[in-house]
Image (tube, helix red, strand yellow):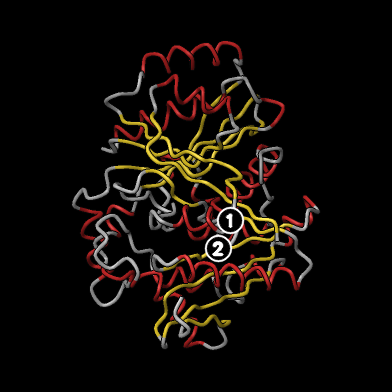
Amino acid sequence: MPNSVTVRPVASSGDRRKFIDFGYSLYDGDPHFVPPLRMDQAKILNEKKNPFFEHGEIGLFLAEDNGKVVGRIAAIRNGMHLQKYDDNVGFFGFFETVDDLEVSKVLVEAASGWLNERGLVAMRGPANPSLNDTSGLLVEGFDREPSILMAYNKPYYEKHLLDLGFERKMTMFAYYVHKKYIDITKLERGAAIVQRRNPGLTLRTMDMKRYMDEAMIAKDIYNEAWSENWGHVPMTDHEFEHLAKDLKQVVDPNLVYYLELDGDTVAFSVTIPNLNQALKHVKGGRLLPLGLPTLLARAKLGGVYETRMPLMGVRKAYHGRGFDSLMVLETIKRGKEADYDACEMSWVLESNKVLVNALDNMGAVVDKTYALFEKTL
């Protein structure tokens, strides 16, 4: 590593701009990179606007070579994770670097030191800043664009982390469900069986007039349904409200479902348009002056023809009863009616064998693979 490479904490608004900018400039010319909106990236890192900071803490670092940014990383203390697991595990995220192992090394060392100072003994990631946000490292599927709110990164990142002593902690899949290849008849037969066994089961769409109340119902089910899944950290009311407000801008209420059994809500699913298909045409992630008109034009002209299901949950008492199949079937049927060709279900933990088997059996295919890595400090 050249002696001119240094690592320093982000200490000013100018540093923060450099930190955000590097996440765009590094991917200049990459045909599969979809630039997230800069305003969203800034909001995630803003202590006054992101409710993560009510329990979490983030240290940002820049690596520079003769004043030019060549890498960045965030060290993350997630208070909700520590409250649930009490394992002294910290996190890293917002990791970007040129293809130089020594740059990655000094970045990891800086983040490790920050975490050590706070009594943490391991670092896991990437999480941006938590597993409830965009997280995971793309390890397979670099020749395709990511779906909305999914990670994309350089192919050499995995090798850098492994060479620096990280180990893969968990593998996650993005399943692709296309209307041409899914076995609708098989799904309909299964759904009919579920319905016969549960005659009081009804499905409804989201009531946008009660949007935030509906969102809080989903939060309660989500936190219960996922509580025993690997790495799950419950979302606080403020975090879920924050997420719900963001999703409200893109949500299609005809693709958000609640299952009720004898009047009690027992499951939900959320599917959103894959706006990355329009965002990829917004240069540099800037909405102004031309980004917003481009985004709206692409969306209206049929430029968005896929969806993503980022959230689904069934209360524990009803696991294994096939309730999820009803929501998947409805998503496919209504998606076709709305001219959506396909849906990405992501991500799905490798350890979630029930869901993995169900998706395999219905004809879904693994389109991309992500992973989380961990290192003892």
User: Which residue is found at the position 48% from the left and 83% from the top?
Assistant: 3
Q: Secondary structure at mark 2?
A: strand
Q: In this figure, which residue is indicated by the disc labeled 2?
A: 93
Q: Position of residue 318 (x, y in %)?
A: 67, 25
Q: Is residue 36 left or right of residue 19?
A: left
Mark 1 crowd level (few <14, some 14–19, many ≥20, 10 Å Cα): many
Mark 2 crowd level (few <14, some 14–19, many ≥20, 10 Å Cα): many
User: Which residue is found at the position 44% from the left and 39% from the top?
Assistant: 174
Residue type marked 2? Gly
Quarter where residue 284 is shown: bottom left
User: Which residue is found at the position 37% from the left and 49% from the top?
Assistant: 147
Mark closest to the chain's N terminus, 2 or 1: 2
232 vs 121, nearest the viewer: 121
User: Which residue is found at the position 31% from the left and 50% from the top?
Assistant: 145
Q: Position of residue 102 (x, y in %)?
A: 49, 69
141 vs 28: above or below:
above
Q: Quadrant of the C terminus?
A: bottom right
257 vs 51, nearest the viewer: 51
Evaluate if marks 2 and 1 touch, with contact meaning CB atoms under 8 Å apart: yes
Q: Position of residue 274 (x, y in %)?
A: 35, 49
